[in-house]
Image (cartoon, rainbow, N blue to C red):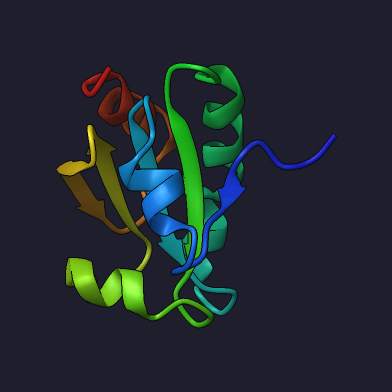
C-alpha cells in the first residue's frame, strides 16, 4: 500500500494540480523541515479519507524550486488549495489534523 498523497514535481505541477478535475491541496515541504514531517501523517490520513473528493499532493521544494517560487512561497510547510486551476486558499505552518480537515472541508 503506497502513500495516499501524490509526489508532484515542477514538470507535473500543471497536469496534477492546475488541470485536476477535483480540488487539490498542495503541501510544499522539505526533508529537513520538522513541522513538515509533523503534518505528513495527518495529510496522508486526510488523503485517504477524502479520496475522490480532494487530491493531496506534496512538492519537495529542494528538488522543485520553480512551483513554490511562482506561488511566492516564503516559509514551509505551506499548503495551497487549488480549485479549477486557481488558488482559492492557503495556509502556512503546521496545524493539527482537525484544523487541516476543517480547512479542506471548507473547499469542497
Image spot of residue 31 (x, y percent): 59, 74
Whether residue 75 is visible, yes or no, is: no
Find the residue positioned furthest to the right.
1
In front of the other: 79 or 67: 67
Whether residue 24 is visible, yes or no, is: yes
Image spot of residue 37 (x, y percent): 57, 60
Residue drawn 30% across and 71% down?
68
In front of the other: 65 or 107: 65
Image spot of residue 78 (x, y percent): 31, 60
Dividing the picture into quarters, in which one does residue 3 lie? top right
- From the image, which quarter does the N terminus lie in? top right
Residue drawn 51% across and 73% down?
30
Residue drawn 24% across and 33% down?
83
- How many marks the image carries: the answer is 0
Question: On the rendered structure, is 23 left or right of 88?
Answer: right
Image spot of residue 56 (x, y percent): 48, 39
Dividing the picture into quarters, in which one does residue 48 lie? top right
Residue drawn 43% across and 48% down?
15
Q: Is residue 58 above or below residue 102?
A: below
- From the image, which quarter does the C terminus lie in? top left
Question: On the rendered structure, is 47 left or right of 70?
Answer: right
Question: On the rendered structure, is 85 left or right of 76?
Answer: left
Amino acid at each position: 500500500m503506497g502513500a495516499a498523497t501524490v509526489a508532484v514535481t515542477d514538470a507535473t505541477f500543471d497536469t496534477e494540480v492546475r488541470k485536476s478535475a477535483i480540488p487539490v491541496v498542495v503541501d510544499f515541504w522539505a526533508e529537513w523541515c520538522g513541522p513538515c514531517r509533523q503534518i505528513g501523517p495527518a495529510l496522508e490520513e486526510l488523503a485517504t479519507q477524502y479520496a475522490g473528493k480532494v487530491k493531496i499532493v506534496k512538492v519537495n521544494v529542494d528538488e522543485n524550486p520553480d512551483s513554490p517560487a511562482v506561488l511566492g512561497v516564503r516559509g514551509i510547510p505551506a499548503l495551497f488549495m487549488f480549485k479549477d486551476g486557481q488558488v482559492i486558499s492557503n495556509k502556512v505552518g503546521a496545524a493539527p489534523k482537525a484544523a487541516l480537515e476543517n480547512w479542506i472541508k471548507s473547499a469542497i
